[in-house]
Amino acid sequence: MNKHALVLAAGKGTRMKTKLPKCAFPIHKKPMIEYIIESLEASSIDETCVVVGHQRKVIENILDGRVSFAYQEKQLGTGHAAMAAEDVLGKKEGTTLILLGDMPLIDETTIDNILSTHEKLNNDLTVVTTNYLDPSGYGRIIRDKYGKIESIVEDKECTEEQRNIQEVNTGIYAIDNQYLFETLKHIQKSAYRDEYYLTDIVHLMRHDYTVGTYTIRDNAIVMGVNDLYAISIAEKVLRDSINREFMKSGVSMINPETITIGHNVRIEENVTIYPNTTITGESTIAEGAHIGPNTEIHNGIIHKGVTVEHSLIHDSVVHERATIGPFAHLRNNAHIGRDNRIGNFVEVKKSTTGANTKASHLAYIGDTTTGANVNFGCGSITVNYDGKEKHQTDIGDDVFIGCNTNLVAPISVGDNVFIAAGSTVTENVPSGALAIARNKQINKADYARNLIKPKGQTVEDAKEDKTE
Ligand code: UD1
Ligand code: CA
């Protein structure tokens, strides 16, 4: 039996009050719709069609190459959105699982359980329901006196009595694909709004087809995200479940409610994460690392035994046992070698360092290749930008760069070089050389008293005193 998924993501998300289309809104830096597609990819679904409409390009770019798209030009409701998929899915045989693009917490196990129950019960339509203590905002499940599903009534359209029903429509349906497109043709516009409700398929099908329900116990998994408050709830649910899994597999978290780990992050055993730390994107943290407090890592590869405190690491790699921070910033392909020390207020951009290299304080290393055993003194700067273009700096092994040195790129420094503190180096330095590039010091004997004033006097007063 072929299994198709149909995801409705054409809506604007008016209740979000943001510019991005709702399904593209990020949760832990990843668009909401991507969570759903990842779960579908991990499930037994064979192919997925996503209905796009409002700002379609944004969603299409996010999912490019992973799904097929149908287009709903005007957003006339969920039933109308499903109809838009007829060109893509209309002729197919099999079961279609309909999902809404605003349920980011759905997982592959739940998806497969729904599909297997639908098959086992031999249903033509299975409506997936759940229960909430506070069901407001959701469509309510109306059952007849035998307990059989009769219809779904939207929150705003409920009678007082219906409003108390805690069983709600999750917006997920498993349905025979041919019956879906036949039934959609019969949906009428709602009496209350300028919309075609997908929920109408229930009362349209209930007499002539086998219609059943499947109830999900963990209601958080199928929550619909309609506004920014719901985003925060989804983030919290996701955070708690991800952190719980990591802690159970040997990752120690201090104050875990302040720690956010993204969906695609891998963390090995015996790692400790300290408060206020966020690790997102395609990041990996290897065994024995200590990360945080107050640290943000996005697309970072952190090797064994590394320590990172109070720092930012974006799109960068840190090799074994290096220590990063406090207050370091690695970005845009910084590759930090093993046993490095990148310390206080050091920024490294698009640069590689060899083993045992150190920049302990106040340095900028940009567009640079650095060998092993290099010491960047306090205040060292690779001057990579001339106002128009970026230029490259190459530094060999065993180089000592004195404090407050400017290396004006493009420039190359050989092996075993010593650069005197305060130098502004504009010419290449050959291996083995001592480079001094600063004015020679002049000491004017007995002159300072002309300039230093005793307390309460002006410099002029002091000069007069001396001439008397
Ligand atoms: C919907 C259900 C409600 C259910 C709830 C579960 C309907 C009529 N209501 O309500 O019963 O309890 O989800 O979370 O189906 N969309 C389109 N085109 C449109 C309108 C919507 O593609 O014209 C997409 C949206 O992008 C969104 C999804 O459909 O991803 C759901 O739309 P939304 O407006 O959030 O529906 P709810 O009011 O939450
Ligand atoms: Ca919704």
Image: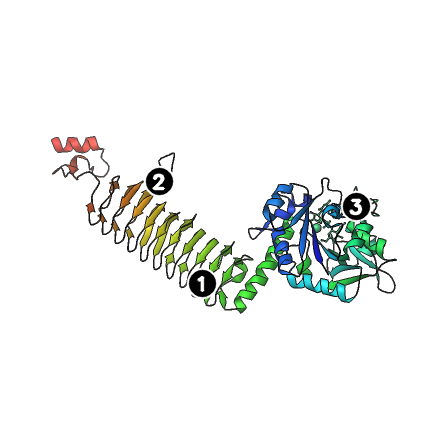
Task: Indicate yes or no: mark 2 CB to ligand 1 under 8 Å.
Answer: no
C-alpha span from label 3 to label 2: 59 Å
What x and y, as percent, mark residue 356? Answer: 31, 58
Q: Residues within 10 Å of mark 2 (few under 14, many from 20)?
A: some
C-alpha span from label 1 to label 2: 33 Å
Identify the amino acid type marked 3. Tyr
Residue 218 visible? The answer is no
Could you tell me which secondary element the residue under label 1 belongs to? loop
> Which residue is labeled 3 in the image?
196
**Rendered residue at 14%/39% (across/down):** 443
Quarter holding the C terminus?
top left
> Which residue is labeled 1 in the image?
286
Query: From the viewer's perspective, is the residue at label 1 or at label 2 nearer?
Result: 2
**Rendered residue at 70%/65% (across/down):** 113
**Rendered residue at 40%/63% (across/down):** 305
Between 255 and 49, the residue placed more toward the observer is 49
